[in-house]
Amino acid sequence: MGILTRFSVAMDEELLARFDDLVARRGSAVNRSEAVRDLVRDALVDAEWEDSAGEIVGTVTMVFDHHASDLSDKLDSLQHAHHERIVSSMHVHLDAHNCLEVIVVRGTSEQVRAIADGLLGTKGVKHGKLVSTTTGKGL
């Protein structure tokens, strides 16, 4: 970490109160400064994802009914088609019908988004989300 620099932020009273509530929910180890740093890091990760031609990392999380017509086979086929980009996957049986799958994907942001869109857009996937992250270099 480099040298810390102080700066001021002007904020509407109501917005600041809501922000303080958020900080309080995060626990005693977090203060306004750390919360602002987290928000800035998140924005920088998003910007890196948008602008990056280099390799980035993301997770695709999805919930689906494994009894749905050949859905598991379709999802497996999509993953095998992109085996060089899929680092790992975890499959969890939530109940008698529903499964949760988390897939770690790496590649350019375009490649990762395409894989996520293919998986999440498969008929029968109930809910899902792509979460982007980075190695943190330069953050």
Image (cartoon, rainbow, N blue to C red):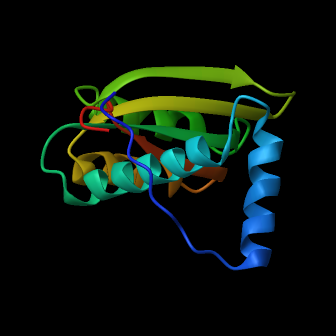
Residue 64 point in image, percent of width and height: 69, 42
Residue 94 point in image, percent of width and height: 81, 27
Residue 70 in view in this figure: no
Q: Nearer the viewer, residue 2 or 37?
A: 2
Residue 9 position (above or below residue 87): below
In the displayed structure, does residue 32 sit left or right of residue 13?
left
Residue 129 position (above or below residue 31): below
Residue 103 point in image, percent of width and height: 48, 30
Tell me the residue at 58%/74% (across/down). Answer: 10
Q: Quadrant of residue 62?
A: top right
Tell me the residue at 74%/47% (across/down). Answer: 23
Residue 122 in view in this figure: yes
Q: Quadrant of residue 15?
A: bottom right
Tell me the residue at 70%/35% (across/down). Answer: 66
Tell me the residue at 30%/31% (across/down). Answer: 2
In the displayed structure, does residue 67 sit left or right of residue 61?
right
In the displayed structure, does residue 23 sit left or right of residue 101?
right
Total marks drawn?
A: 0
Residue 111 point in image, percent of width and height: 24, 48
